[in-house]
Amino acid sequence: MPDRRTRVAPSPAAAPLAASLAALRRELRLPEGFPPEVEAEAAAAAGRRPLPDTDLTAVPFLTIDPAGSTDLDQALHLERTSHGYRVRYAIADVPAFVAPSGAVDAEARRRGQTLYAPDGRIPLHPDVIGDGAASLLPGVDRSAFVWDLRLDADGHETDATVLRARIRSRRQWDYAEAQAAIDDGTAPDELRLLREVGEARIACERERGGASLNAPEEEVVVHDGVYALERRTVLPVESWNAQLSLLTGMAAARIMLDARIGILRTMPAPDEAAMRAFRIQTVALGLPWREGTPYGEYLRTLDADHPRAAAVLQAATALFRGAGYVAMDGEAPSDPVQSAIAAPYAHVTAPLRRLVDRWGLVICEALCAGAEVPGWARSSLADLPAIMGNSSRLASQVVAGALDRVEAALLSSRIGSVVDATVLAVRNGGVLVQLDDPAVTASAPRPDGVQPGDRVRLTVTAADIATGRVSFEPVTE
C-alpha cells in the first residue's frame, strides 16, 4: 500500500499545534536537555573512544534504518555457509561509554528509553554518545557487541555467541534504498541474502506459532516544518531486518535462561475467553478465523487495506496485552515466554534507545566468555522491570497525546464538514472509526445498528487543538 500522508497546513493550525505539543511536554514533565554534569561526563567518555582488541573491521558490515537516522544501534553481515547461513549482528557498545553509577548512567535510569515526539525526540543518552561515538556510523571504527549466529538451511539457529569487537560499517542504507537494491538485484551479497534469511526466519516463526498484527504504522512526522500524519505499510525489508533482531533476542534469552541470570521480555498468552471473543468477532466481520489455524497464521492472511480486516486487526489488539520485563538471578521465571514471539525473548539490540539492553548485552557477553557477570549489572537487575514499565507508560502517553493533538489540528479546518470512515470497534456505547481523509482514528457516537467493518458518514462538530479532543455526529440519510 502506498504511503497515506495528510499534512497540517502551515497556517492557521501550525502555531496552535506547536503550542499544544509544547504544553504536552510540560504536562508530562519531559526532560529538556541534559544536566551539565551529564553532558560533561558523556563528552569525556566519547573522547576516549575505546576499541576492543578483537578486530573485525575486514567484515563489510552495513546498517539499515529509517532515512536520516543517526543513532544506529545495529549493523549486519550475512553470508552463506555449507550448512546454511552465518549472521553477524553488531550492536552498539553503549556500556563502553556509560560508567556504572556515573552521571550518564543515573540520568539514563531516570529516562528509561528514548521518547519520540513530533516536535523532537527526547534521547536516552546525550547526542555525543547516541548520535556520535557509540553509533555505528559508516566509515569509522566502532566498538560493538558482535553476535555470531549460525543457521541451518531452513533458518533454524544452531549456535549463538557474542563478543566485543572492533567493526567498521561500510554503508548506511535506508529502508527504501535497501528494498530497491534487493528488488532490482544490485544489492551486495551481504544485503541480498537478507531476503532469504528473513523469509526463512518468518517460516520459523510460523512453525513456532508466533504472531504479529501486521497493521499499517501510524505516526506523526515533520516535513519542512509542517506536521504530517502518516499511515504506511511496512516494507518487506523492514520485516526481514526485524527478524534478525528477534533471532538475536531469542538467542540472548536462551543464554540467560541457561545461566539463570538476566532479564527477559515476556508477555502472557491470551486466555481462552479473549481467544473465544476474538473468534466470534472475526465471524461477525465476515473474515472467520477457522478452527485449527494458529492465530498468528490467521493474522498474516489479512489484507490491512480491507475495511473489515482493519476492524479484525483492531479487535486482535486484545490478544497482545500484558508485556513486561522479568529479572532473574538464580531461578528462572515460571513462564519465560513472550507469547507473540512464541519463545523466550530478551531486548538486546537497541541499547542507544532502550536502557534494559545494556544489561542483557554485558550479561550475555560475560556468560559466553565464561566470565563473571559484572557486579553493577547483577546488583541492579531487580530495578529494571519497574524502570522500564514506568518509561513505557510515559512513552505511550507521549505518543497518544501528540497523536490526539495532530489529529485535532488536521480536523480543525473541517468543522461542519462530512467525512467518510470505517468502524473499527464498538465500545462504551460509541464506535472507534478510521477516517478516509484525513487519516485519523477517533471515537464517535454509534450510528444506529452499525457494526465493526461498516462504512459510516460523520459530521465533524469540534476539534480542539489545545486538548486534542475531537467530536462527531452521525450523518442521518
Image (cartoon, helix red, strand yellow):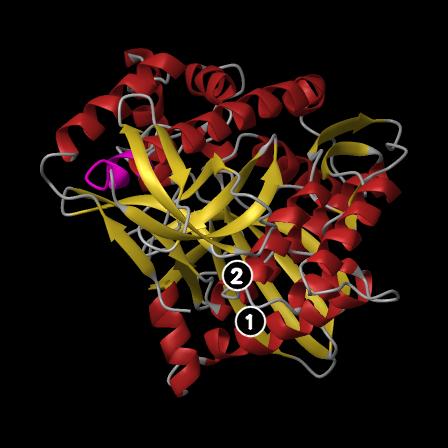
In the image, 141 versus 362, the foreground residue is 362
In the image, 238 versus 261, the foreground residue is 238
Position of residue 457 relative to residue 33, above or below, is below
Residue 342 position, x and y percent, is 78, 52
Residue 365 position, x and y percent, is 66, 42
Say whether residue 34 is visible.
no
Residue 321 is one of the magenta-drawn residues: no
- In the picture, the disc for residue 258 is none
Q: CA distance from mark 1 to mark 2?
A: 39 Å
In the image, 28 versus 381, the foreground residue is 28
In the image, 297 versus 386, the foreground residue is 297
- Can you tell which quarter of the image residue 183 is in? bottom left
Position of residue 359 relative to residue 59, above or below, is above
Residue 248 position, x and y percent, is 65, 53
Position of residue 384 relative to residue 278, above or below, is above
- Can you tell which quarter of the image residue 80 is in? bottom right
Q: Residue at x 24, y 37 (%)?
A: 415
Say whether residue 421 is visible.
yes
Question: Is residue 147 left or right of 135 when viewed as pictured?
Answer: right
Q: Residue furthest front?
A: 477
Q: Residue furthest left?
A: 11
| Residue carrying label 1 | 78
* Residue bounds of the magenta highlight: 407-415
Position of residue 352 relative to residue 113, above or below, is below
Circle 1: is it few (<14), some (14-19), or many (20+) Cα within 10 Å? many
Q: Earlier in the sequence, mark 1 or mark 2?
A: 1
| Residue carrying label 2 | 307
User: What is the three-letter code of the residue carrying label 2?
Assistant: Pro
Q: Residue at x 70, y 67 (%)?
A: 150
Q: Residue at x 42, y 61 (%)?
A: 64
**Circle nearer the viewer, 1 or 2:** 2
Question: Is residue 345 left or right of 354 when viewed as pictured?
Answer: right
